[in-house]
Image (tube, helix red, strand yellow):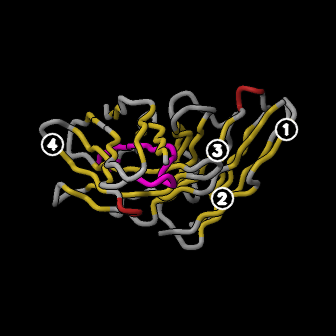
Amino acid sequence: AQSVAQPEDQVNVAEGNPLTVKCTYSVSGNPYLFWYVQYPNRGLQFLLKYITGDNLVKGSYGFEAEFNKSQTSFHLKKPSALVSDSALYFCAVKEYGNKLVFGAGTILRVKS
Amino acid sequence: SAVISQKPSRDICQRGTSLTIQCQVDSQVTMMFWYRQQPGQSLTLIATANQGSEATYESGFVIDKFPISRPNLTFSTLTVSNMSPEDSSIYLCSVEPRQGVETQYFGPGTRLLVL
């Protein structure tokens, strides 16, 4: 069965510093990996995805993520954090034809 | 990406009553899904809404409690029946526009509080 883990409940970073939100996954076949962001009182917004190809994926709002097959990880990164990046971030994984499975979520707090 | 709207955006309901949530998409989509997000929790898939046939429910969710309709390729409803305070959650509709695209896009959600 497919699963995804986000080991950190919360990540704190100062504005202007780089940020990383961690995600590891488990699937039996080839993974499709996604990051979503949820702002307070809002739905989920799609940030980026990895399906195949280049291991470094670039997405919305300056975010990027690196697919690492050997470590089964798909960490979300941004070179310079903004206060407005503060939100709840979800990693999700699926295999072709299967349902999307979400991690528990990581709260990102960016302080000025 | 598809533009998805949900009605109502929020509601406060009395236990024992039912609420129907609507999901409207601005274009025809292949797949539509309903999720529940309990307070402080992640998203849990309730069911896949199938156009023209019965929805496919995940373990722990039953049709009597969460009846779903999908009359066409742009619209679906989820009913939360005989509500209890444990049903207080955010209910989200999502879509996969086309098979092979593999990205799900989410509506803004419906915040439900059951008293």
Q: Which labelled disc corresponds to residue A37? A: none
When asked about the image quadrant of residue A55, the answer is bottom left
Task: Give the extent of the magenta segment.
Answer: A81-97
Tell me, yes or no, whether the highlighted magenta stretch contains residue A112. no
Tags 1 and 4 on a common chain: no
Residues at marks 1 and 3, CA–CA distance in whole angstroms:
14 Å
Residue B36, above or below A32: above
Q: Secondary structure at mark 3?
A: strand
Label 2 with label 3: CB-CB less than 8 Å? no
Tags 4 and 3 on a common chain: no
Residues at marks 2 and 4, CA–CA distance in whole angstroms:
37 Å
Quickly name the residue at label 2.
Answer: B23
- Relative placement, left or right, of A86 versus A13 is right
Q: Which labelled disc corresponds to residue A69? A: 4
Q: Secondary structure at mark 4?
A: loop
What residue sits 52% from the left and 40% below the top? B45
What residue sits 31% from the left and 31% below the top? A1
Quickly name the residue at label 1.
Answer: B13
**Residue B71 shows in this picture:** no
Dot 1 alpha-carbon crowd within 10 angstroms: few under 14, some 14 to 19, many 20 or more:
some
